[in-house]
Image (cartoon, grey):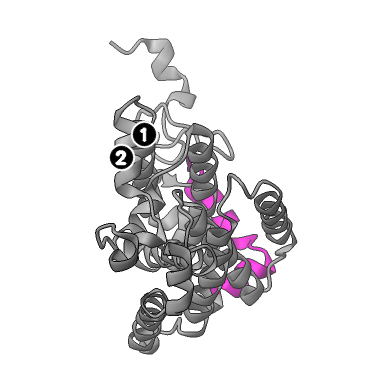
Amino acid sequence: MTTPEFADNRDNFCYRHPDRQSFVLCQRCLRTICPECQTQAAVGVICPECMAAERKNRTPAQKKAERRWGGRNTATATVRSGRPMVTYVLLAVTSFIGLLQLIPGVGDLITQQLLFAPRYLYPDLSLLPFEPWRLLTAVFAHGGFLHLALNMLALWMLGQSLEPMLGRVRFLSLYLISGLGGSVALAVLDPSGATVGASGAVFGLMAALLIIGRHIGANVTGILVILGINFVIGFVFQQNIAWQAHLGGVIVGALVAFILTRTRRREQRTLQIVLLAAVVVALVLIVAFLPPFLIATVYS
């Protein structure tokens, strides 16, 4: 039962609707707000007045993004569209598979079923079954807990920015096509190798954020530094890291982002789909028509 002291304390009721009890505070001004007055933000909820102030205080880069990306700025896109669901689904699925891989006995079996090795594309030479789907399944498997944790942290951070900006379908397309590009790069540059991990897809997201940031006039120095550091790490510790997949992810992710920035208008949607499909077809053709002498040399 509500006590008189509780009822007399106006902090226990919505500041805009004094008759509505609530225990939720605006994360900006810390005033009590009822469900009707709550707007989901990147962290917690904010009240209508703080939401209006955030829209008013947009940076020049955010205003430019609003004009170029269909009337919504990147700062409020996350608030309006809620949580980046595709990012969270990818995190959940990949983390679940990664945790299963940590189980003794079961983990090795899962890894063997999902990893990508170019030899699975050339059964006549490698004496292994033809399993081209491994080009993508490798994105969802990892080589250990640290490998999984670092990639999922990067996916979570990048997805918070990119998915609201691009939309769910475009973001998922960018992620998967970048992962495919990483596997294709490994097949071209190291036909005898093998790989697991979402690194190619994550590097594609970083490259896309760089391209889109440049397109809207944002400061991209930070993402350039991160890309550079990760490439150096890949080359220094190349015995444990498939730097070829990183390189392929960056190239393909940048290409996909370039297509998205140049075909953002509604009337260009068909052209956008055609161009993205052309990228996928080109990647498939690359591994389908690798120089026969290269493959024969590796598997002879």
The vertical placement of 142 against 31, above or below, is below
Q: Do residues under tags 2 and 1 come within 8 Å of each other at their CB atoms? A: yes
**Residue found 68% across the figure and 73% down from its top:** 217
Between 175 and 29, which is closer to the camera in this rendering? Answer: 175
Q: Position of residue 272 (x, y in %)?
A: 39, 83
Q: CA distance from mark 2 to mark 1?
A: 6 Å
Specify whether residue 70 is in view.
no
The answer to if 188 sits in the magenta stretch is: no
Of labels 2 and 1, earlier in sequence is: 1
Q: Amino acid at mark 1?
A: Gln
**In the picture, residue 66 is in which quadrant?**
bottom right
Between 142 and 68, which is closer to the camera in this rendering? Answer: 142
Q: Secondary structure at mark 2?
A: helix
The vertical placement of 23 against 228, above or below, is above
Say few, some or many: other residues with alpha carbon within 10 Å of mark 1 (under 14 / 14 to 19 / 20 or more). Answer: many
**Residue found 51% across the figure and 84% down from its top:** 262
Q: Which residue carries the number 2 mark?
A: 110
Q: Secondary structure at mark 1?
A: helix
Examine the residues drawn in magenta and state their main secondary structure. helix
**In the picture, residue 14 is in which quadrant?**
top left
**Residue found 43% across the figure and 24% down from its top:** 12
The vertical placement of 6 against 257, above or below, is above
Q: Position of residue 188 (x, y in %)?
A: 50, 70
Q: Which mark is residue 120?
A: none
Q: Position of residue 192 (x, y in %)?
A: 47, 59
Q: Does 224 sit left or right of 270 as displayed?
A: right
Q: Which residue carries the number 1 mark?
A: 101
Q: Which residues are magenta?
A: 42-66
Q: Amino acid at mark 2?
A: Ile
**Residue found 61% across the figure and 46% down from its top:** 239
Outermost front residue? 300
- Picture quarter with the N terminus: top left
